[in-house]
Image (tube, grey):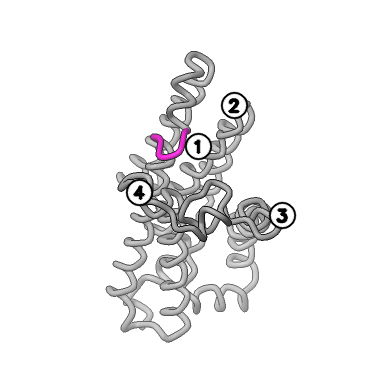
């Protein structure tokens, strides 16, 4: 972690401490663990906060550097910011439970949890959460964290394309921290809602990546323009 800034070290430390804390609570106080991972619980709210924070960080960089880059860069950065903002909103059902807002009849009839969000929607007998937000997103995450950095480092044409769209690439330290956190969460914790903690880890790692990506000089810089 010697190449990380003070903020990055702080966020990384918070991530590992809170994950270890979850493991400790899981083995010592099962009822409190249930409380931590419940809807709008400690980890879910932090996930939403960091997804929003990451989205706003991208928007800040967009307005700071947009005059130095072309249309594809603007599209890519804004799309990623929008995706992260969407994830933050979906995580807390757009504040529905926080502000005690009732779902419309449409969402009551077509949402597995009768909430105002898309990831729990049911189309026929298919749950979008499992089809899209579990299966397809898992593939996308694997490509983003494991394949994209390799392509950026070893395939010049792909590197140019990735940079042209302003895609933030994970640094090796980000990948290592995420793998360690994933192992700490998934191996010892045998609980159906352990994925809430994993999503929290993902949100923090995404903030670290956007804050200081591998290709920061290529996509967030005035030097080459």
In terms of depth relative to the viewer, which is nearer, 211 or 121?
Answer: 121
At x 45% / y 50%, what residue is drawn?
91
Whether 46 is drawn above or below 89: the answer is: above
Mark 4, residue position: 49
Q: Is residue 137 magenta?
A: no
Question: Which quadrant holds residue 40?
Answer: top left
Q: In terms of sequence position, does the residue under pointer 2 or pointer 3 come before the other?
A: 3
* Distance (Cα) linking label 1 and label 2: 10 Å
Q: Which mark is residue 107?
A: none
Name the residue furthest top: 28
The reply to whether dot 3 and dot 1 touch (C-beta < 8 Å) is no
Which region is colored magenta? 38-42
Residue 143, percent across and down?
64, 59
Name the residue furthest front: 105
Whether 125 is drawn above or below 70: the answer is: above
The reply to whether dot 1 and dot 2 touch (C-beta < 8 Å) is yes
Q: Which mark is residue 125?
A: 3
Secondary structure, mark 3, is loop
Mark 1, residue position: 197
At x 39% / y 58%, what residue is drawn?
212
For label 3, the crowd category at 10 Å Cα-Cα, with few meaning under 14, some 14 to 19 and many 20 or more, is few
In terms of depth relative to the viewer, which is nearer, 149 or 30?
Answer: 30
At x 59% / y 26%, what residue is drawn?
189
Mark 2, residue position: 189
The reply to whether dot 2 and dot 3 touch (C-beta < 8 Å) is no
For label 1, the crowd category at 10 Å Cα-Cα, with few meaning under 14, some 14 to 19 and many 20 or more, is many
Which quarter of the figure is the N terminus placed in?
Answer: top left
């Amino acid at each position: 972690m010697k190449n990380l800034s003070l903020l990055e070290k702080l966020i990384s430390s918070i991530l590992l401490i809170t994950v270890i804390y979850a493991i400790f609570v899981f083995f010592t106080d099962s009822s409190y663990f249930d409380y931590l991972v419940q809807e709008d619980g400690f980890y879910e709210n932090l996930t939403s906060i960091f997804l929003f924070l990451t989205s706003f960080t991208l928007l800040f960089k967009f307005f700071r550097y947009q005059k130095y880059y072309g249309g594809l860069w603007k599209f890519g950065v804004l799309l990623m910011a929008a995706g992260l903002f969407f994830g933050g909103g979906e995580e807390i059902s757009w504040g529905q439970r926080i502000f005690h807002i009732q779902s419309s009849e449409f969402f009551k009839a077509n949402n597995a949890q009768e909430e105002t969000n898309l990831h729990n929607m049911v189309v026929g007998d298919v749950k979008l959460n499992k089809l899209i937000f579990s299966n397809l997103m898992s593939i996308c995450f694997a490509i983003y964290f494991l394949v994209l950095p390799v392509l950026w480092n070893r395939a010049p044409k792909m590197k140019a394309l990735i940079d042209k769209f302003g895609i933030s690439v994970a640094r090796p330290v980000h990948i290592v921290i995420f793998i360690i956190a994933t192992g700490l969460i998934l191996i010892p914790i045998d609980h159906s809602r352990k994925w809430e903690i994993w999503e929290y880890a993902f949100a923090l790692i995404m903030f670290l990546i956007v804050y200081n990506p591998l290709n920061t000089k290529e996509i967030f810089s005035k030097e080459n323009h």
